Image: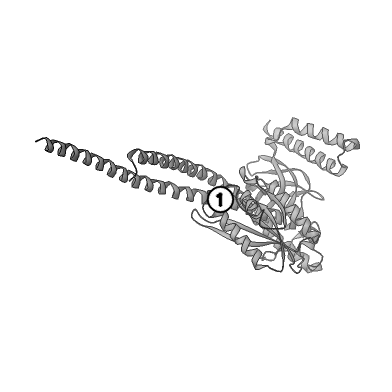
Amino acid sequence: MADTFDIEIATPERLLAREKAIRAQIPAKEGYIGVLPEHASLLSELGIGAMTYTTPDDHLFSLAIRGGFLEIHNNVVRVLSDIAEKGHEIDITQAEKDLKQAQDEMVNPALGVDIASALTAARHAQARIDAARKAAAKEE
Amino acid sequence: MPSLIDLRRRIRTVKNTQQITKAMKVVSAAKLRRAQDRVLAARPYAQIIRRMLANVAQAAAEHQGDEGIELLAKRPERRIQLLVITADRGLAGAFNSNVIKTAHKFIQDHPDADVQLELIGRKGRDFFRKRHRSITGDYSTLFQRAVRYEDALDIARKVTERFRQAEIDAVYLVVNNFKSMMASRLVVTRVLPVELPEKQEQTDYIYEQPAAQLLASLLPRYIESQIYRAMLESSAAEHAARMTAMEAATSNAAEVIDTLTLNMNRVRQASITREIIEIVSGAAALE
C-alpha cells in the first residue's frame, strides 16, 4: 500500500505542478472530492473552487481552479483545469474587488451582465480568495 | 570594370546587410528557444486530454453509440473549412510559401467541395485575399507576440460553432510542425469531425458524470488544444526557418564580400601597374 500518490496539475498553457502528495481536496463539479493514496480510478468534471494538496513533508499547497477535468488512475491524480493559479500568486485585494463587482452585477440587472456569468465570476473570485487565504495561513 | 570607389561602396552595403541578417538570426534564436519551451509546456495537458478522450469515448460508445455526439458526426464533405497557419512576417525561407502551396493543392484536390478559408497569419491572408473567394476570417497579428491560449480558443469556438450549425461539414488544418532546426514537417490534419485517438488500455473508471456528458465537454477542449498546439508548433517552426534562412544569408553575404574584395584588389593593382608603366615610358621618352 503506497502512502503517497502523484499529483499533476496542468492548464492548456503549462504544467503547474507534478509532485508527490499524501492527500488532496479537489472541487469537482458535484462537490469537493477528498483524495488519499490508492484512490479508485475516477473521472469527473471540475467545478470552481480552491483545491489543496499536502506534500509528504507536510506542506499545504492551494490553487484556485475553474473548470476542467479530474482523472484519478493508478495512484496518479491528474487535474486539467482551464484556469488555475497558485494561491500565493493571487492578489487578494484584487480578488476581493472582483468579488464585490460580480456581486453587484448579480443583484443589479441594470449593469447589463447576465446573472449566470456574474455568478461564475463571483464563484471564481471567491475561489481565488479562498486559495490565497489558505496559502497565506500556511506561511504563518 | 567598375571603379575602385564603386567597389568600396558595394562592399560597404553588403557588410551592412550582413550585419542585419546576423542580428535577425540571433533574435530568431532567442525567440525559437522561448517558442520551444511553450510547445513543451503545453504537451502534458494535450497528452492527458487525449488519453482521457480515448477512455471516455469508449465508455460513451458502449452506452449509447456515437450517434448522439454532434462533433463526431461524419457528413459528406461538401463545405470544408480549411485553417491555414502561416507566419505574420516573411524572410523565413520557404516557410510561408510551403504552407500556401499545400493549402492551394488542398483546394485543387477538392474541386467538388466549397473550401472556405480561415487564415491565421498575415502572409496567408495576403496571398489568398485576392485569389480565393470564400474566406471566413483572418488574423494578422497573432504571431507578433507569444501565442496565447485565448487566441486558439476564439478560433476553435468559431469553427466548432459553424460545424455544429452544419455550415461546414469538416475542418482541416494546414500547418508547419516543428521538427528540427533544419526541417519542419507540413501536415494536413482533420480537426472536425473529431478523430478519436486510439486507446491503449481498458480502465474501469468511476464516472462522476455520465460518460456522454463528459465526452461532450471534453471534445471542445480537445479541439482547442489541438489548434493551440498547431499555432505553437507553427511559431516554433517559423523562428527555426528564419534562423536557418538568416544563417544562409549571412554566409552568402560573406561570400559576396570576398569576391568583391578580390575584384577591388585587382582593380587597384591594375591601376598601380598602369601608373608605373606611364612613369617608366615617360622616363624612357626623355632619354
Local crowd size for mark 1, using a 10 Å CA cut-off: few (<14), some (14–19), many (≥20): many
B267 versus B286 height, above or below: below
Color scheme of the displayed model: one colour
A134 versus B134 height, above or below: above
State the residue at coordinates (51%, 57%).
B183
> For mark 1, what is the residue?
B238
**Relative image position of residue B2 (x, y in whole percent):** 34, 44
Residue A85 shown left or right of residue B28 in the figure: right
Residue B231 shown left or right of residue B7 in the figure: right
Identify which amino acid the numbered label 1 is placed on.
Glu
Towards the viewer: B7 or A30 = B7
Q: Chain of mark 1?
A: B
Residue B18 shown left or right of residue B225 in the figure: left
State the residue at coordinates (51%, 55%).
B180
- Residue A3 visible? The answer is no
Q: How many marks?
A: 1
SS at mark 1 in the image: helix
